[in-house]
Amino acid sequence: MSQLRQILKSTLDGLLPRSLFLTQGRELRSESALGDASGPAISLTFDDGPHPEHTPALLDELDAAGIEATFFIVGERAKCHPGLVRRIAEAGHEIGNHTWTHSEPRQTSTSQFLGELQRTRAFLEDLTGSPCGIVRPPKGELSPGKLFGLLKTKQPIVLWNQDTKDYSMMGPAEMGCWVTQYSPRHGDIVLMHDLHPHAATGIALMRKLYAYRDVQFRKVSDWLPGDTGVKSFNPKPLATVWAEPRINANGR
């Protein structure tokens, strides 16, 4: 993300209500209280799926770790793999809207963008029987017209403040380096992609590292005020066998 876009994102985050624009969590809803947890709460988000190989591997790792996350799903890929979308929902993860085609933002008109969001929301809600009210635009890019059009719908726009850049990683060792160097901070929204294989590697490593022992993993809707229509949950401790950081050639 360019420096100008970072400035614009920070400006919007300060000007717009948290119920409509979120780049970083601040306060959890009262019904999502951390209870006895002593560490920071963060949200893991996964974009661009589902993928027939990488998404199941990621879901297996999330299940083993006891993590509930948020998936921003592309409609046409969901249509190709409806069983995977149902599996995501049935596992307790949150599903967000990532447009129907994930077309290049600068080549997509406002009317096409808003139409794709409407189509994707209807398809995902019909498929899962659960609300799909949160939106992440492709690449996090929004023109003024798309922003104003989306704000009128009152669907929360969810971006991120921590980018793994896993889409450009050449192998699992790069994800291993990111996970070991990252220091979780309360409210972080982390961007990964289940269209690529590295997210599953990252979750597997988080289960092993002592640095993640007190981290609580939350759906992004837990940071939104009011009733989002998404069922919250009581946080579970990360299912792990702790070890000091040690990365081998496979990043595990």
Image (cartoon, rainbow, N blue to C red):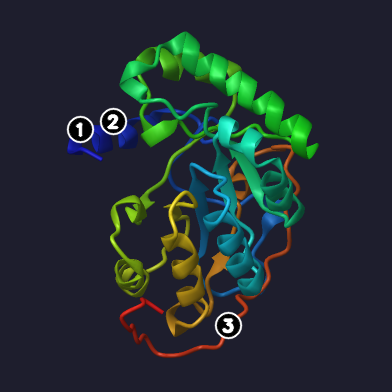
The residue at which mark 1 appears reads as: 4
Q: The residue under label 2 is which amino acid type?
A: Leu
The residue at which mark 3 appears reads as: 240
Q: The residue under label 1 is which amino acid type?
A: Leu
| Residue 31 sits above or below residue 178 on the image | above
Q: Residue drawn at (35%, 55%), measured in percent from left and top?
A: 166
The residue at which mark 2 appears reads as: 8
One can see residue 232 in this view: yes
Secondary structure beneath dot 3 equals: loop
How far apart in space, not on screen, are marks 1 and 3 (Cα)? 40 Å
Looking at the image, the residue that sits furthest to the right is 129
Secondary structure beneath dot 2 equals: helix
Secondary structure beneath dot 1 equals: helix
Looking at the image, which is closer to me, 214 or 179?
179
Q: Position of residue 169 (x, y in %)?
A: 30, 58
Query: Do labels 2 and 1 touch, CB within 8 Å?
Result: yes
Q: Residue drawn at (76%, 39%), measured in percent from left and top?
A: 128
